[in-house]
Amino acid sequence: ACAVAGRARLGRQVSRQVFAHRDRVGLAVAALEVGDDAFERVFALDAAHLDYQGNVAVRHPLDILVNDIGVDKIAKHVKASLKGMKVASYYGCQVVRPFATFDDPFYPTSMDRIVKAIGAEPVEWPLKTRCCGGSLMGTIAEAGLRLNQHLLLEAIRKKADVIVTCCPLCQLNLECYQDAINKKYDEKIHLPVMFFTQLMGMALGIPEKDLGMHRLFVKPEPVHVAKEKGVP
């Protein structure tokens, strides 16, 4: 509640939209509750000298990029070729659920549209909204490892060169626990997993250091990024 109210205060001067990733669901719930005057019963707001009048739209950056900026405009700014790169878009279980405000809750395509617009090839795979286990890695690790093993193996089966996601926790689970999965289940998984904006940045010609590519556990093969002059 305090997070939404604080952004509302900023919104009076700058913007009335909240660009949220993992916290979108919680913020959206809080924003909806104002209709029932729930915020009047939240003492934290009074303690922080905040109020909220329902004037903040909680939106995901993916929503903004696809529906406000548009994939056609994004495509016009491509400076590096991703031709031949097969990309599995992983949305996770909470980006479009329980509130399907900008995409289909069962088979979303907004990230796939961006992938196609920047010159890569989106692969069709049925697990794009299957849960990665979320915080299970810190509580019931075996269950979390098994869930991520299924996701990674399916992406490999679909011949994906990389998985892109729009959820930071999903990226953490799919990327950082590959060695643990390999050890436990005798696999040989070595698949790059990055945030979808990092892939966009590659296509838009943004330096790798600025994109944090050096922080990835598995970097995408450089052969897929052939620098060209102008739009490929």
Image: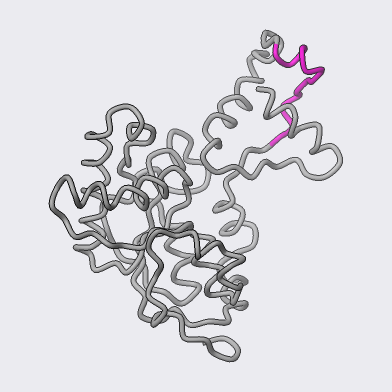
Looking at the picture, does residue 115 appear above or below residue 3? below
Residue in the picture at 78% in, 20% down: 51
Looking at the picture, does residue 133 appear above or below residue 64? above
Q: Residue furthest right?
A: 13
Residue nearer the viewer, 113 or 182 = 182
Residue in the picture at 77% in, 18% down: 48
In this rendering, position of residue 17 left or right of residue 62: right
Quadrant of the image containing the N terminus: top right
Magenta: main secondary structure equals: loop
Residue nearer the viewer, 166 or 126 = 166
Return the x and y of residue 201 as percentages of the image width and height: 56, 68
The image quadrant that residue 58 belongs to is top right
Q: State yes or no: residue 159 in magenta.
A: no
Return the x and y of residue 33 as percentages of the image width and height: 61, 20
In this rendering, position of residue 108 left or right of residue 77: left
In this rendering, position of residue 185 left or right of residue 54: left
Residue in the picture at 27% in, 58% down: 125
Q: Residue furthest bottom?
A: 229
Looking at the picture, does residue 56 appear above or below residue 161? above
Looking at the picture, does residue 87 appear above or below residue 40? below
Return the x and y of residue 106 as percentages of the image width and height: 34, 45
Colour approach in the figure: one colour
Return the x and y of residue 109 as percentages of the image width and height: 41, 57
Number of marks in the rendered image: 0
* Range of residues picked out in magenta: 44-56
